[in-house]
Amino acid sequence: MLGRYERGASGEAVVEYGDGTMRVIKPGSFVRCAVTGTAITLDALRYWSVERQEAFATPEAALQRLKESGRP
């Protein structure tokens, strides 16, 4: 079954990340994790940075990016 973001769209999406929301700018079926490069289907996307406008596949990837940025 196709998710609401996957119907008729293929390839990498362009997404604008907000606080608790996201807006699809260019339709696609996935985005890439900024740390691992893993493809993340839009229906499975749970972690992102509003400040950096980046997606993360796991909480560990998000934490790794946070540590790399020098933030506590």
Image: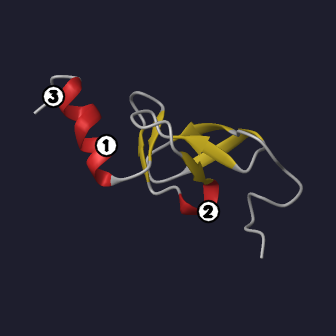
Please tell me whether mark 3 or mark 1 is closer to you in this view.
1
For this orientation, the residue located farthest to the right is: 8
Q: In the structure shown, which secondary structural element does the residue marked by tag 3 occupy?
A: loop
Name which quarter of the figure residue 67 lies in.
top left
Judge left or right: residue 26 versus residue 70: right
Residue name at image x 61 percent, y 62 percent: 43
Vertical arrangement, residue 52 with respect to residue 42, above or below: above
Question: Which corner quadrant holds the N terminus?
Answer: bottom right
Give the left or right position of residue 60, taking residue 37 as reference: left
Tell me which label, 3 or 1, sits earlier in the chain.
1
Mark 2, Cα crowd under 10 Å, few <14 / some 14-19 / many 20+, is few
Q: CA distance from mark 3 to mark 1?
A: 12 Å
Cβ–Cβ under 8 Å for marks 3 and 1: no
Q: Considering the image in quadrants, where does the C terminus appear?
A: top left
Locate residue 10, reporting x and y percent.
Answer: 81, 47
Position of 50 with respect to 4 (left or right) is left
Kindly report the distance in space between the C-alpha atoms of the residues bearing marks 1 and 2: 18 Å
Q: Do the residues bearing badges 1 and 2 touch, measured as CB atoms within 8 Å?
A: no
Q: Residue at x 52, y 55 (%)?
A: 45
Q: Point out which mark residue 43 bears.
A: 2
Element at label 2: helix
Q: Amino acid at mark 1?
A: Ala
Q: Position of residue 48 (x, y in %)?
A: 43, 44
Q: Which mark is residue 62?
A: 1
Task: Check disc 3: other Cα within 10 Å, few if <14, some if 14-19, many if 20+.
Answer: few
Query: At 24% across and 37% down in the image, what residue appears?
Result: 64
Q: Amino acid at mark 3?
A: Arg
> Which residue position holds label 3?
71
